[in-house]
Amino acid sequence: MSELEIGGVTIARAARTAFSLPVPGVDEAHWPIVVAIRGREGEPFVVVTAGVHGGEYNGIEAARRLGRGLRPNAVRGTVVVVPLANAPSFYGRSHNGSPLDRKNLNRVFPGNAYGTATERIAAALAAVLGRADAVLDLHGADPMEDLHPFTMVPDHAPPQSEALARVFGVRPILRGSSPGSMVDWLAAKGVAAILVEAGAFGHLNEGAVRLHYDGCLRVLRHLGVLRGAKPAPLTRPWERMKWVSSPRTGFFYARVRAGQIVGKGAVLGEVRDAATDIAEKITSPVAGKVLFVKKSMATSSGNSLYGIAVAEPKPPSATGARPARRGVSARRSTPTRRETSRGSRRS
């Protein structure tokens, strides 16, 4: 990769270049922020994104520090950091829905260059992400969510995604799918990509920031982008998220917290009818660790209230594994089987 251009901006070798990614048809104030750190060698090409949901501050801060802290003369290849992918949501203090069109950026990939504002932003980002050898997407919880850290890898992702997840170092590691999400779209293209969640209640928390930041550095060392000893990967088994939804519309009261271990049949909370005050208990359909708890008192029938991690019953088949992408080769990563994870209705 002798010449590198992103959004019409030439990324020079041995330099850091910061700019706003142009999105035709969208006001410049709402363009994604990009910091590109390029060494003297052309590959690999790694992208770190944050702020896909504007209220998830810990990933945004970790990506901001990463873009500011990486030195071009210490980088092999190119690291493109997008610390603020969804500026309308961030500045509008919204979360899933953009104030411009009420659409969730993580449900419209690969976007539409002629669509609504959120779809146009997704299309501009997709033009960069689709060229990557590896993508790390940093997330967290909004002000109404309690959350225990976890990593997700899409179903049908290429084998290298497993290595990224295990090296990043945030457990548990889940598999699954969310149509229209950034990492699901990348998996379909054969790009190694993972999503990491850390942080709760929309608070900027130094511990959550460090989980994201340190995980990114481990992956960059693993890929040979940064010098240093190769990190030891996690060896824990794969898990999936079991979602528990609201049985009715009304007043919601949670009785458990994120990180708590629950047994099958355990009472997780209750929903009270707004008119009659009749309570309906919510019980756990499985035994596992609570990773996600919605803390809003208001709920509607079918809303996701809890996410519980449960072990997968058996290892996945290697049949149908996607080929390795350029730049993330077997000499850098040699996973033994195609195991992937994702599975969130909220991310």
Image (cartoon, helix red, strand yellow):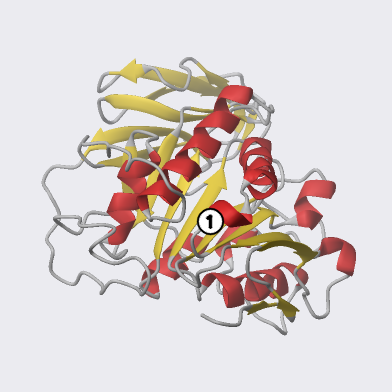
Identity of the residue drawn at 57% across and 38% down: 140
Relative to the observer, which residue lies in front, 20 or 121?
20
Residue 8 shown left or right of residue 268 in the figure: right
Q: Is residue 304 above or below residue 193?
A: above
Mark 1 residue crowding within 10 angstroms, few (<14) / some (14–19) / many (20+)? many
Q: Position of residue 276 (x, y in %)?
A: 62, 22
Tell me: residue 287, above or below residue 267: below
Percent x, y of residue 147: 51, 29
Query: Which is more toward the observer, 76 or 174?
Result: 76
Residue 109 in sight here: yes
Q: Residue at x 40, y 75 (%)?
A: 189
Q: Identify the image quadrant of residue 275.
A: top right
Read off the residue under disc 1. 75
**In the image, residue 202 lies at what x, y percent?**
67, 31
Q: Amino acid at mark 1?
A: Val
Q: Secondary structure at mark 1?
A: loop
Q: How many marks?
A: 1
Q: Is residue 347 visible?
A: no
Residue 261 as seen in the image, left or right of residue 150: left
**Residue at point 71%, 67% (across, down):** 118
Q: In the rendered view, does 268 fall on the left or right side of 332?
A: right
Instruction: Please report the residue visible at 64 percent of the width from the left and 76 percent of the height from the top.
Output: 123
In the rendered image, residue 196, in percent from the top left (x then y), is placed at 47, 43
